[in-house]
Image (cartoon, rainbow, N blue to C red):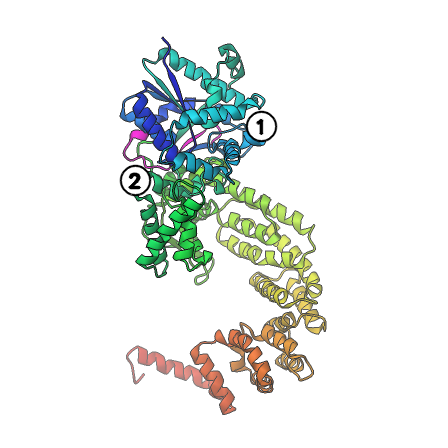
């Protein structure tokens, strides 16, 4: 006789569902367990029995000739499918997946995007049809919740399934509910119809061959379709055109944050940390121990938490659950109670601990004998070639880019950074030793393996994936500055094709924009690229011409952009202009670029409509570049600080001229006297109003510099400030140097 088949409709990543499934399996004692999942990956299920396999983990599959088309199926320790598979392995019961083979999940070969097999909110984790459909098809649990008077399906599912102390015949009730929902809908089509047809055929096969009951673990939405009778020939017709592609597959580590639907995972849950807590802690202790976890997190954040407050928190959460007619407090009630009793009613205090508490930071582990994903294999090869061992402890690494090994190591670390795998963090970027030196701080974190696996959508090797990721970000860049940053990243990572793509995009966008700030913001990263390219043997000729073009366009637009700005806009533009000036000075002057830039600054200084902070900065930049004499600088400063100028404008010019350059007052008597007269002449209320400005300007001076400035002001002399050469210094200094050298050599009479 055909074996009896029992379908258990579940919600992916639901601890309550997982617990109910285990109870049902113990009671049924099936001879075979069938699980919704890619049928051609069933051979990977036994690996879950390895003690070194620690969830969360994910099935990873991709075409052997195109790893960029990767698909993932994540599993947490509280996922019903994971627990069902482990139950079958413990009891030596055959277990396999019954959903469509992986090839059906592959996008068109010409597409370059990966996907996570997740489903959507449609059946809280049981995948739904990608085709357009009704609201019920997209969110059947939400429809049931609405009928029960709930605002959302998540709360309803937890109350009825996850946290209900007396759920009754859950799976039968769910099957009836889903049947009622599907009765008024048109039959599924496309991939969704093929999925259910394939599962029905696999169930029929097991019904004929199994020696006892068969258990089917699937999304609740599919249960009515799998229990209904369909002609086998019709089901075979739906799947006869299965694509023929060679598929490679393995297990990959996953992380708790990637189990959330906020991260784009449709079958995810709101709070994986809470789900893990429900799975690990006995029901009678769940509320108390969660309150203790909240207290521990708050105390770790420096908050004071009393025992009495913890008691009140649990009481309030229980009361809230009763008022809301819930069987027991959920994390929402505990959150509200914690905010009221432990966070002084301040949601911001709760926000400081909510993410690590509710989401968690668990990282999965994969046994050593499990085949690795291509990117992880490539990383291991390059780590061996670079003689760099991934370690959890922080380690300093100094690199000389003129050596082959130093350049290889630097390139690897930069490419990993482009893939959001910051194994190394650049600490000085050549600031102290020139562009041929780099200093890194290395520290390997387990979640970096997950980041690499997810980057398979961009390429099968570190170089391919980094280039693909950077190109994708270039296409999404919202400004010239962001695009220029990505070009610099591509250059430092030795991603020539990606850099050329970025340069072409820069040229196209620069010809279309008239936004001065956008053009000037692009100059610093471009200047860094031009300078840094010398250390990496990259061709920067085209980039140099593009830099000149953008800089000239920005210089021409700057005098007009500096007019009529409010305080915030002026501060923002002042920083942009200062950084652009540093970028122009950083590289060699080509085609009179510096002259064009200085002309723009001169126009700003002479323009009465220019914002005072920008005019002050322009005057100082001209003064520092030798394009304005001390007398001219003092004249401009005196004019702007005269009684006829509004104090707000005078302060703006003063701040623009001296902020970040207050040390000049130590060495320039005329500037110092001019500033001294203006500050001394301010009324008390005006002086107090501008104290924050004065503090910003003089705070950058160290204690010695401030003392020297005060000495110069009160002594009326610069003798203690500036060193003056003796009249016969040129003749005296060589004899003095010889005397010092003889003393150092131990020849005091030399």
Q: Is disc 1 surrounded by few (<14), some (14 to 19) or many (20+) residues within 10 Å?
A: few
- Relative placement, left or right, of 677 versus 36 is right
Q: Is residue 46 above or below residue 561?
A: above
Q: Secondary structure at mark 2?
A: loop
Distance from the alpha carbon under mark 2 to that under mark 1? 41 Å
Q: Which residues are magenta?
A: 48-68
Reply yes or no: does residue 59 show up in magenta: yes
Please state if 235 lies on the left or on the right of 162 as rendered.
Answer: right
Few, some or many residues within 10 Å of mark 2 (<14, 14–19, 20+) = few
Which quadrant holds the N terminus?
top left
**What residue did someone put label 2 on?**
282
Q: What is the number of callouts on the image?
A: 2
Question: Does 250 sit above or below residue 419?
Answer: above
Give x and y (percent) for residue 307: 30, 57
Which of the two discs, 2 and 1, sits closer to the camera? 2
Residue 239 visible in this rendered orientation of the protein: yes
Label 1 belongs to which residue?
131
Q: Residue at x 57, y 52 (%)?
A: 482
**Can you give x and y, in whole percent of width and height, for residue 643 in the image?**
67, 84
């Amino acid at each position: 006789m055909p074996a009896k088949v029992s379908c258990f409709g579940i919600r992916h990543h639901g601890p309550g569902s997982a617990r109910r499934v285990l109870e049902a399996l113990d009671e049924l004692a099936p001879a075979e367990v069938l699980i919704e999942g890619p049928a051609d990956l069933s051979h990977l299920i036994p690996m879950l029995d390895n003690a070194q396999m620690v969830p969360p983990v994910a099935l990873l599959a991709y075409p052997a000739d195109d790893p960029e088309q990767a698909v993932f199926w994540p599993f947490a320790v509280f996922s019903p499918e994971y627990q069902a598979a482990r139950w079958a392995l413990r009891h030596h019961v055959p277990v396999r997946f019954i959903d469509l083979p992986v090839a059906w999940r592959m996008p068109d070969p010409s597409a370059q995007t990966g996907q996570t097999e997740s489903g959507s909110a449609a059946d809280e984790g049981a995948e739904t049809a990608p085709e357009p459909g009704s609201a019920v098809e997209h969110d059947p649990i939400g429809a049931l919740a609405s009928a029960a008077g709930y605002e959302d399906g998540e709360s309803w599912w937890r109350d009825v399934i996850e946290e209900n102390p007396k759920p009754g015949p859950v799976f039968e009730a769910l099957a009836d509910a889903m049947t009622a929902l599907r009765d008024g809908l048109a039959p599924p089509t496309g991939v969704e119809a093929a999925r259910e047809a394939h599962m029905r055929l696999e169930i029929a096969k097991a019904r004929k061959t199994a020696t006892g009951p068969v258990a089917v673990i699937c999304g609740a939405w599919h249960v009515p379709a799998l229990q209904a009778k369909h002609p086998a020939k019709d089901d075979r017709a739906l799947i006869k055109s299965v694509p023929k592609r060679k598929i490679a597959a393995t297990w990959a580590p996953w992380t708790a944050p990637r189990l959330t639907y906020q991260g784009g995972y449709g079958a995810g849950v709101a709070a994986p940390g809470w789900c893990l807590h429900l799975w690990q802690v006995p029901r009678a202790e769940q509320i108390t121990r969660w309150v203790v976890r909240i207290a521990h997190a708050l105390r770790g954040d420096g908050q004071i938490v009393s025992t009495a407050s913890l008691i009140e928190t649990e009481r309030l959460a229980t009361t809230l659950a009763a008022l809301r007619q819930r069987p027991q407090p959920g994390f929402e009630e505990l959150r509200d109670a914690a905010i009221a009793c432990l966070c002084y009613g301040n949601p911001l205090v709760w926000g400081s601990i909510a993410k690590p508490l509710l989401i968690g930071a668990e990282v999965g582990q994969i046994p050593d004998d499990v085949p690795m994903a291509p990117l992880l294999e490539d990383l291991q090869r390059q780590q061996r070639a670079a003689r760099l061992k991934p370690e959890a402890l922080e380690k300093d690494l100094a690199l000389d880019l003129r050596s082959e090994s130093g350049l290889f190591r630097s390139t690897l670390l930069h490419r990993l950074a482009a893939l959001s795998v910051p194994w190394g963090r650049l600490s000085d970027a050549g600031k102290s030793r020139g562009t041929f030196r780099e200093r890194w701080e290395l520290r390997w974190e387990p979640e970096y393996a997950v980041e690499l696996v997810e980057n398979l959508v961009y390429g099968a090797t570190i170089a391919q994936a980094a280039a693909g990721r950077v190109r994708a970000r270039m296409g999404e860049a919202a400004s010239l500055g962001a695009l220029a940053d990505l070009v610099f990243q591509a250059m430092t990572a030795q991603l020539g094709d990606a850099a050329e793509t970025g340069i072409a995009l820069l040229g196209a966008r620069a010809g279309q924009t008239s936004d001065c700030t956008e053009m000037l913001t692009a100059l610093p990263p471009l200047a860094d690229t031009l300078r840094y390219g010398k250390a990496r043997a990259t061709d920067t000729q085209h980039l140099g011409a593009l830099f000149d073009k953008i800089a000239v366009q920005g210089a021409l637009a700057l005098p007009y952009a500096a007019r009529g700005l409010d305080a915030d806009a002026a501060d923002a533009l002042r920083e942009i202009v200062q950084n652009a000036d540093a970028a122009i000075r950083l590289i060699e002057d080509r085609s009179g670029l510096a002259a064009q830039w200085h002309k723009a600054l001169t126009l700003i200084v002479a323009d009465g409509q220019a914002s005072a902070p920008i005019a002050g900065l322009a005057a100082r930049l001209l003064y520092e570049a030798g394009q304005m004499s001390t007398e001219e600088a003092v004249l401009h400063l005196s004019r702007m600080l005269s009684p006829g100028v509004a104090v707000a404008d005078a302060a703006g010019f003063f701040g623009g001229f001296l902020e970040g350059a207050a040390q000049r007052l130590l060495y320039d008597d005329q500037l110092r006297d001019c500033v001294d007269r203006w500050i001394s002449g301010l009324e008390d209320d005006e002086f107090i109003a501008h104290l924050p400005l004065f503090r910003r300007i003089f705070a950058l001076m160290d204690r010695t510099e401030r003392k020297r400035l005060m000495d110069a002001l009160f002594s009326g002399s610069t003798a203690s400030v500036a060193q003056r050469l003796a009249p016969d210094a040129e003749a005296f200094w060589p004899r003095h140097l010889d005397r010092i050298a003889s003393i150092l050599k131990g020849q005091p009479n030399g």
